[in-house]
Image (spheres, rainbow, N blue to C red):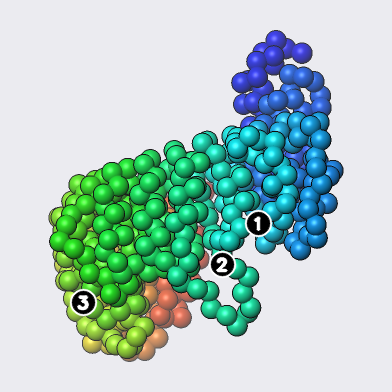
Amino acid sequence: MHRALDIPDIVYEIFRHLRPFPGRSRSDYQLRVLANAARTCRAFTDPALDLLWQDLDTIIYLLNVTHVVGPLYLIKIHGQCDRISDNEWMRFQYYARRVRCLSPHGAVRIDDSVFIELSRHTNGNSLLPSLEYLKWTAILSSQISTLSLIGPSLRRLDLRILPEALRHDEEPPDDDDLSPLLCQVFAQAPFIQELTISACGRPASYLSVTEAKHLRFLDIMGSYTTFSDPAVVHAFSNMESLTNLRVTLDEAFTPSSCSGFSNLQCLEIGGPLLQIAQLLSMINSRRLLSITVVSRTKADLVQCLAPCAKFTSLRTVKCYIDRFENHIILSRRLSDLIKVFLPMRDLESLELRVLKERLAWSDADVLEMASAWRRLTTLVLVHSHGNDSEIPPIWSLRHFARLCPNLTQLHLSIMDIQTPGPLPVDAAPVSEHALESLFIDIMHKRQGPVAELEAFHVAKFLDLLFPHVKWLNMRGVSEWGTVLDQVIEMQRERLTNGISA
């Protein structure tokens, strides 16, 4: 064996490539290869086992290494867990110290007696001493399993907290006090940096989150809890370490006259637009890079977005507005919505999905957007439209091709095929634009069927502007279904002829 393989770091790096890509599950083949490598020689054992046990999707694997504990993990266990011997504990610990990530799938519940027996050997320490990420479902009245897994090494926690077992026709309570559990979590994991909570608890319980002095990411948007008490949000605003926040506000939320969130970089807010605007007004961060707004209320979106004018460092803006309550279709100009963002020259991504508003815009608006946001990579404008709404012609796309070279995704609700003159498909050279995805709803105001020659001209025009487009969807007129095929054929012909696009 080559002497380089005696160095554990080199062996580990080689075996690391046997792991799946991020987001993909480990295949049986990969697991078998690592398991076989661990049995090959002593030099391979630790690196292979470290990778084999690094990420677990169930704790059952660990419980099964002790034959006494293994059969007792099912729900509704009668009696207490049998005692495990010192040798069995050493075997459990031999593998448990390698676990870095535990994210169980499914709803298997482990009986508390198992964790009580295992914890008897830890002297108050965590069962998984190297654990960095934990995704766990906890029962509020039974916290033994949760707390036995949490230790000082934990940095990310995704915690779902359930009340007592409920019948199918029962609603979960909203007045549970989560403070004792959260306080104990932060005491055992004082360096935790990312926290996601899904629970039906009393809003005041979340005041305990402020005890996490190193917390950077806080996600409580997935909870059933909406925040109306300004004291909780005010407490969050004073957390200097907090850079990412996801939260849902209640319609009764009325913040006090204060400012905070001085280091916030990413913010996602749900709830009524009026309350969202109030929270945006109290944020005093010069580092804010991303804002996402999710709402289903009837308040004025322009007034809601007005406080964003002070966030000159913004890179990403997303607004998902569905006026579900009254199904009212409002009419306004697109420029009214985007004017607050036009001074933000570093904006890279803008998504406006306002499903119950008719937006009128023109070629001049397209030019203004393309001129203002030269670094744009994603632009999504989804809105309603009427027959009398002003819409830009398809040739307005040339502004994005000329001024936004980094644009890769473009989704526009409506454009008009009818142009003031013929599309410039002859003199224009093939560009080097990087656009890959183009989605447009087409409105054709002229009477009669669309000529095939006109569809060819549009395909030629799009190919000249965006020669690398891979996803093209044009809805509204049936004849445009062949445009993508024609664009693909043009790309193929260009490559065949050796023309560099």
3D distance between C-alphas at marks 1 and 2: 20 Å
Seen from the viewer's position, the closer of residues 443 and 460 is 443
Quarter of the image holding residue 53? top right
Give the labeled residue for mark 1.
105
> What kind of element bears circle 3?
loop
Q: Quadrant of residue 40?
A: top right
- Classify mark 1: residues with Cα within 10 Å, few (<14), some (14-19) or many (20+): few
CB within 8 Å, label 1 to label 2: no
Which mark sits nearer the N-terminus, 3 or 1?
1
Q: Amino acid at mark 3?
A: Asp
Q: Looking at numbered disc 1 in the image, what kind of residue is underneath it? A: His
Where residue 337 sits in the image (x, y, percent)?
Answer: 20, 69
Disc 2 or disc 3, which is closer to the eye?
A: 2
Give residue 238's position: percent from left, percent from top.
Answer: 26, 49
Q: Which residue is mark 3?
A: 300
How far apart are labels 2 and 3 at the CA level?
A: 38 Å
| Element type at mark 2 | loop
First along the sequence among labels 2 and 3: 2
- The residue identified by callout 2 is 163
Report the residue at 22% width, 61% height from top.
280
Q: CA distance from mark 3 to mark 1?
A: 42 Å
Q: Left of 279 or right of it: where is 177?
A: right
Q: Quadrant of the N terminus?
A: top right
Q: Is residue 4 above or below residue 288?
A: above
